[in-house]
Amino acid sequence: INSTATPIVTIPAYGETFQTGNPMFRWTDFRSPEYKSDQRRSVWLGVSRAEPPNYEWEINWDMYVGDPSIDQVTIGKAPDGNGVDKLNDGRYVFVVLYSERRRFGDLRINRQSATNRPFIIKR
């Protein structure tokens, strides 16, 4: 059930600095090589604060989309987004996590594929 691939994030570039608290993120729509047409898909998008030295996980914004058809989102502009409307200056990580699932009797089998990308907000 493991995925042999991960989503590709095109924006932000690794370590990119945004000069706005409302960055736009872009990625390629993802289906793992193991995906079958009878499986259900979803995507979870998240932005966590990631300050040294501990880089503790602190979700600032997230969004869940069942049966996704999106490949970009802007903080503060996504109607289904949860959390802050604008990011403060600092270090962050953007996460794209796709899930593909199917039923096997009473069990639900889930495959997840994720990519994260560090970025900076500095205005």
Image: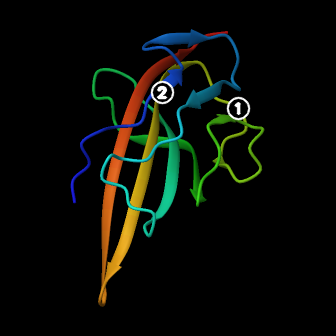
Residue that badge 1 annotates = 86
Q: Circle 2: is it few (<14), some (14-19), or many (20+) Cα within 10 Å? A: many
Which class describes the residues within 10 Å of circle 1: few (<14), some (14-19), or many (20+)?
some
Q: Secondary structure at mark 2?
A: strand
Front position in the image: 64 or 62: 64
State the residue at coordinates (49%, 14%). Answer: 13
Q: Is residue 51 left or right of residue 60?
A: left
- In the picture, the disc for residue 9 is 2
Q: Nearer the viewer, mark 2 or mark 1?
A: 2
Q: Position of residue 100 (x, y in %)?
A: 40, 60
Q: Amino acid at mark 1?
A: Lys
User: Which quadrant of the rendered structure holds the N terminus?
Assistant: bottom left
Q: Marks 1 and 2: in contact by CB < 8 Å? A: no
Residue 61, compared with residue 55, is above or below; it is: below
Sequence-wise, the earlier of marks 2 and 1 is 2
Q: Residue at x 26, y 48 (%)?
A: 3
Count of marks, rendered view = 2
Placement of the C terminus among the 4 image quadrants: top right
